[in-house]
């Protein structure tokens, strides 16, 4: 009897419970609008990728390269200013090697003053001179001596120091010339970018444009090259401009 009552209560509870809600239908994707927010007002000519894909006329690049002074002359001027020329280092080693063949020279000068006195004890009355005699001596001796060290003919220890100094000079020259080469070609790259820059680029009036920033960087590089080469960059550039003007019809 108890089981029947429990089964009836369970059935009534199941009948009173709410049925499960139906699952919502999946939303259909909204159609893409003709003008999306990300593409609104997108001008292909002003996209960053297209602005970076500017091409420079090869004739303009050749003209820029022709107006620049030769980089070899700038390297030589920078090395001469720092006293690190290859000829200077080579001369140190050669002179150290030849120094062993030269003798060691010594010179000496001796001068001797002396006086001697003598007394004639001969009592002959017929002696026409006084019995006392005084003699003076003034001797000068010159000495010149040359000494060769035969071991230095084979090897001079000074060559080791000269070789070390030559290596240090080569390292300093390499650093200086690397700086000149890096600045030289960075300036040429900036000149090419300046030639390819868009003159109608939109920029606020209170802010400098990209062309002005490139010109400032070019001027800074030219000042650094003049400092490294003792003004040789400006002199050679002016000479190159005069030669180019003469060659043009």
Image (cartoon, rainbow, N blue to C red):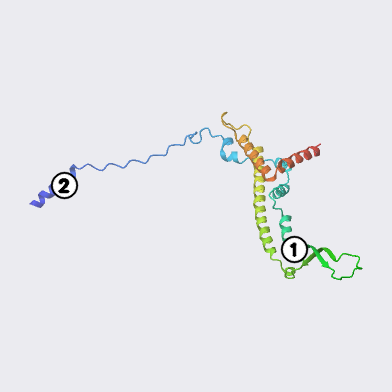
The circle on residue 127 is: none
Nearer-N-terminus badge (2/1)? 2
Residue closest to the eye, 247 or 123: 123
Left or right for 141, reference 83: right
- Counting from the top left corner in percent of width and height, residue 225 is at 67, 43
- Please, what secondary structure does the residue beneath circle 2 have? helix
Which residue is at a point 67% across and 63% down the rendered structure image? 160
- Counting from the top left corner in percent of width and height, residue 52 is at 60, 40
Q: In the rendered image of this protein, does residue 44 appear above or below residue 148?
A: above
The mark lying in front, picked from 2 and 1, is 1
- Asked if labels 1 and 2 touch by Cβ distance under 8 angstroms, the answer is no
Crowding at mark 2 (Cα within 10 Å: few <14, some 14-19, many 20+):
few
- Counting from the top left corner in percent of width and height, residue 193 is at 64, 40
Name of the residue lying farthest toward the left: 1
Which residue is at a point 81% across and 65% down the rendered structure image? 116
Say whether residue 87 is visible.
yes
**Pointer 1 residue:** 99
Crowding at mark 1 (Cα within 10 Å: few <14, some 14-19, many 20+):
some
Residue closest to the eye, 141 or 247: 141
- Between the C-alphas of marks 2 and 1, the distance is 123 Å
Name of the residue lying farthest toward the top: 205
Residue closest to the eye, 238 or 199: 238
Number of numbered discs overlaid on the protein picture: 2
- Please, what secondary structure does the residue beneath circle 1 have? helix
Left or right for 120, reference 239: right
Q: Quadrant of residue 19?
A: top left
Left or right for 116, reference 213: right
Q: Quadrant of residue 230?
A: top right
Quadrant where the C terminus sits is: top right
Residue closest to the eye, 1 or 118: 118
**Pointer 2 residue:** 11
């Amino acid at each position: 009897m108890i089981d029947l009552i429990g089964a009836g209560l369970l059935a009534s509870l199941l009948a009173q419970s709410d049925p499960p809600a139906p699952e919502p239908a999946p939303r259909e994707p909204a159609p893409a609008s003709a003008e999306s927010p990300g593409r609104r007002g997108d001008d292909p000519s002003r996209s960053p990728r297209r602005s970076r894909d500017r091409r420079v006329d090869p004739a303009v690049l050749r003209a820029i390269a022709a107006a620049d002074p030769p980089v070899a002359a700038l390297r030589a001027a920078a090395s001469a200013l720092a006293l690190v020329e290859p000829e200077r280092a080579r001369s140190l080693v050669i002179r150290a090697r030849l120094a062993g063949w030269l003798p060691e020279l010594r010179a000496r000068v001796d001068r001797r003053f002396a006086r001697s006195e003598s007394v004639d004890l001969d009592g002959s009355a017929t002696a026409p001179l006084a019995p006392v005699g005084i003699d003076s001596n003034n001797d000068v001796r010159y000495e010149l001596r040359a000494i060769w060290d035969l071991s230095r003919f084979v090897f001079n220890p000074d060559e080791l120091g000269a070789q070390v100094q030559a290596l240090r000079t080569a390292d300093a020259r390499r650093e200086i010339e690397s700086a000149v080469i890096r600045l030289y070609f960075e300036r040429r790259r900036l000149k090419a970018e300046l030639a390819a820059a868009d003159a109608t680029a939109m920029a606020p009036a209170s802010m400098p444009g990209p062309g002005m920033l490139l010109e400032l960087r070019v001027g800074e590089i030219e000042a650094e090259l003049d400092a490294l080469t003792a003004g040789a960059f400006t002199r050679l550039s002016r000479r190159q401009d005069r030669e180019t003007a003469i060659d043009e019809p």
